[in-house]
């Protein structure tokens, strides 16, 4: 049991780091889902109603972003949609990494350095995940004349 304990601690810390990283990457849909779920709970839907509505709202938020990327043809508007979804992920990544760095080191300078590196890593990951899932081109393709 003494050898199994540290291994389980390592696995649990790794799981929570992965979960935190994933939630930071999808910060806007997670925030929308939690907010709508809490709103539903507080307006009388109960715990099950809030739990049922929250994931639907988060998925809808993510789906709206994917649909916007698939249908918008202007590059500047596509860039605006991407920034709208990646900016909250950047802030969440900075905050999460800074919180972990505060527990690991005492120097505020190094805490900030690691937080910025974490924010950049999560921003890049959010950008790749958000744009990689969307369709490659506009949904409306021109038919060849002939």
Image (cartoon, helix red, strand yellow):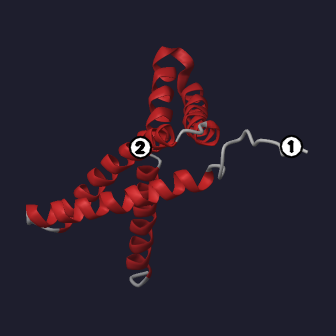
Asked if residue 104 lies left or right of residue 15, the reply is left
Instruction: Tell me the residue that label 2 is attached to.
Output: 83
Q: Residue 98 carries which label?
A: none
CA gap, disc 1 and disc 2: 37 Å
Asked if residue 134 lies left or right of residue 5, the reply is right
Up-down relation of residue 81 to residue 121 (above or below): above
- Assess whether mark 2 and mark 1 are in contact (beta carbons under 8 angstroms): no
Q: Quadrant location of the N terminus?
A: bottom left
In the picture as drawn, the residue positioned furthest to the bottom comes out as: 3
Up-down relation of residue 87 to residue 53 (above or below): below
Residue 105 picture location, percent across and down: 15, 68
Upstream in sequence: badge 1 or badge 2:
2
Instruction: Tell me the residue that label 1 is attached to.
Output: 145
Task: From the viewer's side, name the closer residue of 6 and 130.
Answer: 130
Q: Which residue is at 61% across, 31% downward?
A: 52
* Dot 1 alpha-carbon crowd within 10 angstroms: few under 14, some 14 to 19, many 20 or more: few
Name the element at disc 2: helix
Q: Which residue is at 38% across, 55% downward?
A: 123
Asked if residue 51 lies left or right of residue 111, the reply is right
Up-down relation of residue 68 to residue 8 (above or below): above
Task: From the viewer's side, name the closer residue of 1 and 140.
Answer: 140
* Dot 2 alpha-carbon crowd within 10 angstroms: few under 14, some 14 to 19, many 20 or more: some
Task: From the viewer's side, name the closer residue of 136 and 22.
Answer: 136
Residue 47 picture location, percent across and down: 53, 28
Residue 119 picture location, percent across and down: 31, 57
Q: Which residue is at 41% across, 55% downward?
A: 20
Name the element at disc 1: loop
Q: Which residue is at 61% across, 53% downward?
A: 133
Asked if residue 113 lies left or right of residue 10, the reply is left
């Amino acid at each position: 049991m003494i050898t199994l304990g540290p291994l389980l601690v390592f696995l649990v810390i790794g799981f929570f780091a992965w979960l935190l990283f994933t939630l930071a990457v999808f910060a806007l849909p997670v925030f929308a889902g939690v907010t709508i779920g809490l709103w539903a709970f507080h307006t009388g839907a109960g715990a099950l109603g809030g739990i049922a509505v929250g994931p639907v709202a988060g998925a809808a938020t993510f789906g709206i972003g994917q649909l916007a990327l698939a249908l918008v043809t202007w590059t500047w508007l596509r860039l605006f949609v991407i920034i709208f979804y990646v900016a909250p992920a950047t802030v969440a990544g900075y905050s999460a990494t800074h919180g972990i760095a505060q527990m690991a080191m005492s120097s505020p300078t190094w805490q900030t350095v690691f937080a910025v590196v974490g924010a950049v890593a999560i921003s890049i990951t959010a950008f790749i995940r958000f744009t990689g899932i969307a369709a490659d081109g506009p949904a409306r393709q021109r038919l060849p004349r002939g």
